[in-house]
Image (tube, grey):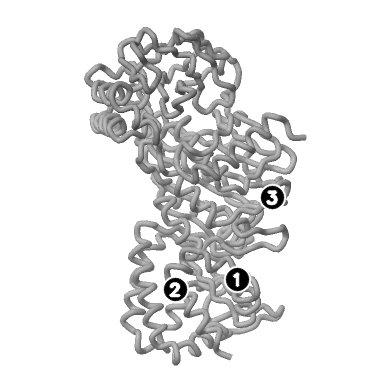
Amino acid sequence: MITPRKLFLLIAILAALVLTGCEGESNPTLPFNFPIPTDLRLSGIINLSDVAVHKDLGGITPSLLDLRPFTVKVQDDLSGPATVDEQGRFTLSPISIRDQVVLFCQHGTNKNLVLEWMAATSAGLYGEMNVTVDLRSTARSMIARSLRERYGRRIRPEELKTEHISATVNAIADVLEKYPTKLSSQPLDQIAEVKAAYTAMADSLHAGNSGAYPNEHVLLLHMGGDNSLSSYIGANIEDIALAGLPSGTQILIQVDTRVDGFKRLMLQKNKFVELVSLGKFDSSSGLVIADFMTWARRAFPARRYSLIISSHADGWKSSASLPSTALRNSLIVDDSAEKKGNVIEIAAYIAGAAANFDGSRRPLELLAFDACNMGSIEVAWEFRNCAAATVFSQAMVPAAGFPYGKIVKSIAGTGSDKLDGETLGRIICDEYRKKYLEGIITQPVTVSMIRNSAFASFISRLNAWFIAVNNERDQYAKVLAGLRDHLEFVVEDGEKKYVVQAFEKAENRDLKSFVSNAAGPLTRIKIDTENLLREFPGLIVCNYHSQKAFPGATGLSVTLPDRQTWFSEFVGPSPSPYFFLAFARETLWPDLLAAINAVE
């Protein structure tokens, strides 16, 4: 049964998708509340008595300004806004105890006129608080929010003195008194002069080491388990709780399962606390993942953030098990919603979620995929702008997934102050190796990590190699087609072992294995091949694989379909979504595939 609250949320998300796209705080707000008690009671007044508000904004003289058009709302809270009387007085419904709160006071007619007030303290906000919202509180809030989201530092806004806020106050006053037309096209905190003032102060405060990091590292887990992985994901969450919360970190989980539906959880010591439960919800949506990220940056300031996505996947490919549409094909399967996520959409939203309201960007330290077949160059290039490093598997991932309890314990042993993206990525890869490759019974798995800062140089060399091959395609297309099909041997059960390392799906081939094996026959492009091979160590910084199942795995695959698959699934009556991938659009690889598969 869809309640009015859920219906409102769904409408809000769809509206935000159509109207605002992928970036920053324009994402829809999923409700969250810290656990009871509900004991923070806010009331106060909007005071504009010291500013001569322009008549176009409803001002004649300060004493005659009618403040009733304003409403007051708590950031990241779905409760309805509070009304304001003519003198600016308001009272909010009680909210739960928390360590920070932001009030937005929006004008009903001039909706871009939004005044602010913020409070923050590690001791927690509770009891009755009397609030004065004015130009000074608005300046303090903008500066504190920018410091929080740009750098992960939390500061008590009341600690900001006149010299800290004067430039921002003056910029706001100029808009309200002299240049009200600037509010016709953008919110107050986005007006260039206002933004320049508060961001400059946030930068200065950070440079002076002002404010504290409430967390060194926040680990986000988006676990799409509304499918056959539901029980495994439940077990993974229990393992994390048993391992306990490492010092200096916070672990937040956004999880969707068959029985319990969609929830957000926060780890406290050895127990997860439920922050919100929404029942049935589409966990395959990139928009929902992006909202999780932007909300976490506001609610849990930290020096660093990383994200693990856990669910079913098949790399970039479409799954036939559920209905598909143009942009809803593979990564993350949600049975109840009858939806499947898509790497193009999800990558765009995660990259967009790095944008803060103040124009700065904070990409993730690490993006890790606990999902099958994600270790391809097509997927990696699509997500290149999302994080400093990416962890994934070229092969299938066991249903039990990452050894989360061991990973969390290793984080505790490493120390949160040393936990950058690559360090966390190596912990994940090491624990995955220990679980699946060093036990009494090993499994056919791979895991690898790439450094995204090396990707631009790598792609440049790779495309140069593609161009060199394409220039000799009349001769080399046949050579590469033969190399693709060349069998090393066939085992007794009929499984084929190719010279170029293949995985469970034969069209997934190890990229370095392909280039290395092509080096001998492609004599005319020897220099291009050597230049490309030198790029691999800088890109692939960690790689473990089953020596028995995948001896030639080096950490990154490429799609190399046989001729039958090419014509039936790629260039048939309905073009494959492959051609919409950034890698396919920005390199010559699709042209080479066409040439290779033209060979009979």
Q: Is residue 516 left or right of residue 61?
A: right
**Left or right: 375 in relation to 171:** right
Camera-side residue: 552 or 93? 93
Q: Quadrant of residue 261?
A: top right
Tag 2: residue type? Lys
Dividing the picture into quadrants, the one containing residue 258 is top right
Q: Residue at x 25, y 32 (%)?
A: 200
Q: Residues within 10 Å of mark 3 (few under 14, many from 20)?
A: many
On the image, the x and y values in percent for residue 99 come to 46, 21
Q: Quadrant of residue 182?
A: top left
Residue position marked by numbered label 3 in the rendering: 229
Q: How crowded is the residue under tag 2: few (<14 C-alpha within 10 Å), some, or many (20+)?
A: many
Q: Say which residue appears at 64% left-offset and 57% top-offset.
A: 398
**Separation of marks 3 and 2 at Cα, in angstroms:** 32 Å
Inspect this view and state whether residue 433 appears: no
Return the residue at label 1: 575
Q: Amino acid at mark 3?
A: Leu
